Image (cartoon, coloured by chain):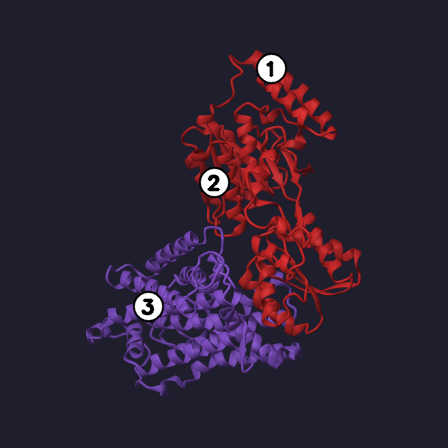
């Protein structure tokens, strides 16, 4: 059976060094240079701190999403999971609504809530055979509804001073959330390159039927990927809540689209089997630089959306140009 | 005749300023009563109290503003002894759903159903009014509607439109902001979703005030889509770009103002740079009390969530004439807004009691917060 796949390559770190994967990096550098030339204040250490802070949550989310997309699936429940974990954390730590004060343990519980929603996604897809698109869309609504119920028109305010200080604070002039995001990225890198889960994920995305014939534990991998994605979405929602100071249903608004964009623009193929967490991180960084840079060079808010779209299109065109002549199905 | 007595009572209760108008109203509705008595078999109220249904139709209840709309509605229903007749419809940001939810409920007993509508978008008001006109249900709308549409243009089921003058809100907070920085310095503005009417008009209010104060300079404005988490990184970026130049932050709603506040907090500037917002949500009021925000302006969600229901009940129980006989300025008027600053922040904290609104729900005082005709 002939597959229109890319040539099979040996496993290992070496395969990450290919020209095609440097496209997005190059685009990122060009973008930074452009903004810095147009507005010198863009290229200051302070602004790098601001960009890294803006990038932290999307980066965490996109690491989780990368594994799901690598396997050729998608998780649309991110915003719902963020909302649910946001309300959960805000009601478990010292807050304005409940008498609880669980501190870090409360945060952990909220992240676990995210993981269990992700687990539910995985089970719906593998055990009940619901397509990932529909399953996660449904779970999005359910999680959103649960969050709304918890909120009840009175978003709980987080009053734990230590958590708030962590959310807003910096360590060695790096925002704390950025440090967490970098740890998550490192974890994702190890998972992807040095564990069976990571390699199987690439194989499943490349060709699920081949992977099945090879006897890989496909269902288990899928459940793990969805659970990880849920866990990181939960972490994202929790951290955003701690930073902004309340549990809110809209805490993740727009993040699903940002995350998928970051993953895809970084070079991970939506049809699966190609890409990785580092590429997604580059994608997330690109979006943060773009949003930040547009404010710096003074692009009018009325046309920012259009400019953002145009730049993203140009970047993805440049980044994937060398793949144009291959026999590749584009989805 | 009961109606005439009620109107008589209304005159007793009213201030001298309003007496003349009310007296005119009494004469007017006296005529109406005569016409009704002559033209119909009986002058009984349009509905029995047990038949009346109260519906609050709004976006969602996760935001404090919407939560308070609902609370206001429930508070009124309880006060009026109609607690079990209260229905809440949430469209979750879907305009079509707001109309279809309405249509669905009107399958039974439309003529005794009153809708108090927080429109998901301006354009949703027209179809909802059409549904009311066709089915005989009653509708009161809030905020803003499409151009050239008025309750008094033959829309007899459209009881009233309670408009909010967003330009006025923008002006009110901008004045406080300019005062707070002594009439000079650089400011930045966080706008709402740019394609919405309140966003445009609140910003127009700011521009109006800026024209009066040439020494206040608008350094930059960005759209944060009413969203707290979107406002946060924008303000962080500004703090780097305009390092030391920002004297104050203007926000088109409280959520964005509070996002800005957290960005200031992260930079150790909370309470040092004045911020203003719009809506009067509890957190903003708290921040004003603490001196971390300067001012906000409120349309009073509790009032908006209840006044339409009160109007409907007054009509359906025959305590006021049918809306088609009301003068124009009672069918479409601007709501008086409340500016909240440090001086009155304490009074505006927490949920109010029904007693605070009882007088305004009274059929004789339904228009006590009118600021004049809206057009």
| Camera-side residue of A316 and B146 | B146
Q: What element does badge 1 sit on?
A: helix
Q: What element does badge 3 sit on?
A: helix
Q: Chain of mark 1?
A: B
Q: What element does badge 2 sit on?
A: helix
| Camera-side residue of A257 and B59 | B59
Q: Chain of mark 2?
A: B
* Left or right: where A323 falls relative to B144: left
Other-residue count near label 1 (Cα within 10 Å), few / some / many at <14 / 14–19 / ≥20: few
Task: Give above or below for B288 relative to A199.
Answer: above
The residues bearing labels 1 and 2 have C-alpha atoms spaced at a distance of 34 Å
Residue drawn 33% across and 68% down? A227
Whether label 1 touches label 2, CB < 8 Å: no
The x, y position of residue A89, in whole percent, is 43, 63
Question: Are dots 1 and 2 on a single chain?
Answer: yes
The x, y position of residue B108, in whole percent, is 40, 30
Q: Which residue is mark 3?
A: A227
Mark 1 or 2: in front is 1
Task: Give above or below for B196 relative to A168.
Answer: above
Q: Which shade of the palette goes to chain B?
A: red
The residues bearing labels 1 and 3 have C-alpha atoms spaced at a distance of 71 Å
Mark 2 or 3: in front is 3
* Left or right: where A41 falls relative to A209: right
Whether label 1 touches label 3, CB < 8 Å: no
Q: Confirm whether residue B266 shows in the render.
A: yes
Q: Which shade of the palette goes to chain A?
A: purple
Label number found at residue B99? 2
Q: Which residue is mark 1?
A: B35
Q: Chain of mark 3?
A: A
* Left or right: where A234 falls relative to A297: left
């Amino acid at each position: 059976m002939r597959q229109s796949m890319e040539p099979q390559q040996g496993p290992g770190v070496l395969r990450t060094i290919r020209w095609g994967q440097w496209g997005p990096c190059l685009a990122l550098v060009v973008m930074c240079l452009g903004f810095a030339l147009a507005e010198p204040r863009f290229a200051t250490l302070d602004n790098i701190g601001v960009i890294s802070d803006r990038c932290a949550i999307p980066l965490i989310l996109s690491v989780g999403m990368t594994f799901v997309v690598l396997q050729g699936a998608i998780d649309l429940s991110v915003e719902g999971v963020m909302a649910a974990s946001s309300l959960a954390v805000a009601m478990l730590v010292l807050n304005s609504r409940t008498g609880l004060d669980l501190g870090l343990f409360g945060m952990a519980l909220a992240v676990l809530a995210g993981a269990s929603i992700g687990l539910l996604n995985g089970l719906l897809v593998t055990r009940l055979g619901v397509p990932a698109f529909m399953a996660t869309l449904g779970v999005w609504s359910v999680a959103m509804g649960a969050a709304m119920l918890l909120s009840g028109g009175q978003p709980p305010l987080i009053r734990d001073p230590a958590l708030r200080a962590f959310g807003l604070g910096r360590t060695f002039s790096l925002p704390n959330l950025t440090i967490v995001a970098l740890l998550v990225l490192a974890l994702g890198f190890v998972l992807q390159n040095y564990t069976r889960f990571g390699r199987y994920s690439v194989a499943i995305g490349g060709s699920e039927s081949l992977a099945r014939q090879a006897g890989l534990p496909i269902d288990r991998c899928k459940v793990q990927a969805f659970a990880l994605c849920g866990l990181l979405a939960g972490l994202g929602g929790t951290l955003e809540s701690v930073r902004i100071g309340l549990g809110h249903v809209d805490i993740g608004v727009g993040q699903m689209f940002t995350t998928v964009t970051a993953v895809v623009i970084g070079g991970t193929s939506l049809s699966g089997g190609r890409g990785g967490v580092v590429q997604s991180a580059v994608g997330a960084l690109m979006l943060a630089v773009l949003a930040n840079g547009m404010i710096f060079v003074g692009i009018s808010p009325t046309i920012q959306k259009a400019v953002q779209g145009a730049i993203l299109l140009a970047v993805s065109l440049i980044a994937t140009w060398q793949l144009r002549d291959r026999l590749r199905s584009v989805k | 005749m009961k109606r005439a007595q009620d109107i008589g009572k209304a005159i007793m209760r009213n201030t001298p300023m309003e007496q003349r108008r009310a007296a005119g109203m009494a004469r007017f509705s006296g005529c109406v009563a005569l016409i009704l008595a002559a033209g119909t078999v009986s002058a009984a109220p349009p509905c029995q109290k047990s038949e009346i249904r109260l519906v609050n139709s709004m976006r969602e209840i996760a935001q404090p503003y919407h939560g308070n709309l609902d609370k206001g509605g429930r508070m009124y229903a309880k006060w009026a002894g109609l607690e079990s007749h209260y229905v809440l419809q949430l469209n979750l940001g879907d305009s079509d759903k707001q109309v279809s939810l309405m249509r669905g409920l009107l399958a039974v007993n439309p003529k005794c159903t009153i809708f108090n509508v927080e429109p998901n978008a301006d354009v949703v008001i027209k179809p909802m009014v059409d549904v009311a006109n066709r089915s005989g249900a009653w509708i009161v709308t809030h905020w803003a509607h499409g151009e050239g549409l008025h309750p008094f243009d033959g829309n007899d089921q459209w009881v009233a439109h309670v408009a909010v003058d967003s330009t006025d809100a923008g002006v009110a907070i901008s004045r406080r902001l300019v005062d707070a920085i002594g009439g000079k310095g650089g400011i930045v503005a966080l706008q709402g979703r740019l394609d919405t009417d309140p966003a445009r008009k609140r910003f127009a209010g700011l521009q109006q005030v800026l024209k009066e104060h040439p020494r206040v300079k608008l350094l930059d404005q960005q759209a944060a889509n009413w969203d707290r988490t979107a406002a946060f990184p924008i303000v962080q970026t500004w703090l780097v770009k305009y390092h030391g130049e920002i004297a104050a932050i203007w926000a088109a709603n409280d959520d964005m103002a509070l996002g800005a506040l957290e960005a200031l907090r992260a930079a150790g500037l909370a309470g040092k740079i004045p911020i203003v917002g719009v809506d009067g949500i509890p957190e903003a009021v708290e921040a004003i009390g603490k001196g971390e925000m300067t001012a906000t302006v409120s349309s009073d969600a509790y009032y908006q969530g209840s006044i339409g229901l009160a109007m409907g009940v007054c009509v359906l129980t025959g305590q006021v004439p049918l809306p088609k006989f009301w003068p124009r300025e009672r069918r479409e008027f601007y709501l008086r807004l409340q500016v909240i600053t440090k001086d009155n922040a304490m009074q505006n904290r927490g949920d109010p009691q029904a007693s605070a609104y009882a007088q305004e729900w009274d059929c004789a005082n339904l228009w006590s917060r009118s600021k004049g005709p809206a057009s």
